[in-house]
């Protein structure tokens, strides 16, 4: 299967082009916010820890670190590599659609600051 195949094409191939109705039960779903994640891998699966990065300034006189970043992990999602690949493809399509409408997402915070100040 080509890396450029869409998620829809893969779904059609996996179901033999049969129409499938999906019902999502959200009664027990929990919602959390994360501004960071940490992938942990094994030969069988991928674990994604989601949480909040927090930066704390440190007053040092000895030239040590000036800040400490703490990753407060709050959720873990464990998926197999097949699901991870489908997730990566879906996220790529979603982000691509967003960037097409609103412009490129700048990941470097220093570059975002320069653009905001212009």
Image: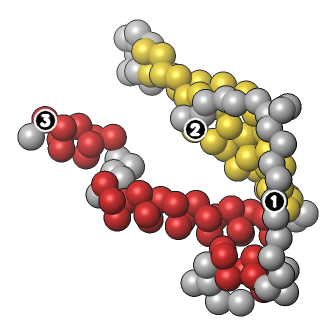
Local crowd at mark 3 within 10 Å, few (<14), some, or many (≥20)? few
Return the x and y of residue 65 as percentages of the image width and height.
45, 24
Which residue position holds label 3? 117
> Label 1, label 2: how many angstroms apart (C-alpha)?
30 Å
| Residue 26 visible in the picture | yes
Dot 1 falls on a residue whose secondary structure is loop
| Residue 3 visible in the picture | no
Instruction: Give whichever of discs 3 and 2 has the lower sequence position.
Output: 2
Which residue position holds label 2? 36
Name the residue located 60 percent from the left edge and 33 percent from the top edge.
Answer: 34
Image marks 1 and 2: residues in contact by CB distance under 8 Å: no
> Label 1, label 3: how many angstroms apart (C-alpha)?
46 Å
Farthest residue to the bottom: give it. Answer: 1
Local crowd at mark 2 within 10 Å, few (<14), some, or many (≥20)? some
Q: Which quadrant of the structure image shows residue 79?
A: bottom right
Which residue position holds label 1? 22
């Amino acid at each position: 299967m080509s890396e450029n195949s869409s998620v829809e094409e893969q779904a059609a191939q996996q179901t033999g082009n049969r129409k499938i109705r999906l019902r999502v039960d959200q009664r027990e779903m929990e919602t959390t916010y994360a501004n960071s994640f940490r992938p942990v891998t094994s030969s069988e699966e991928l674990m994604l820890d989601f949480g909040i990065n927090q930066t704390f300034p440190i007053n040092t006189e000895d030239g040590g670190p000036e800040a400490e970043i703490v990753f407060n992990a709050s959720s873990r999602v464990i998926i197999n590599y097949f699901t991870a690949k489908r997730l990566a493809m879906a996220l790529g399509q979603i982000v691509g659609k967003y960037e097409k409408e609103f412009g490129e997402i700048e990941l470097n915070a220093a570059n975002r600051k320069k653009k905001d100040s212009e």
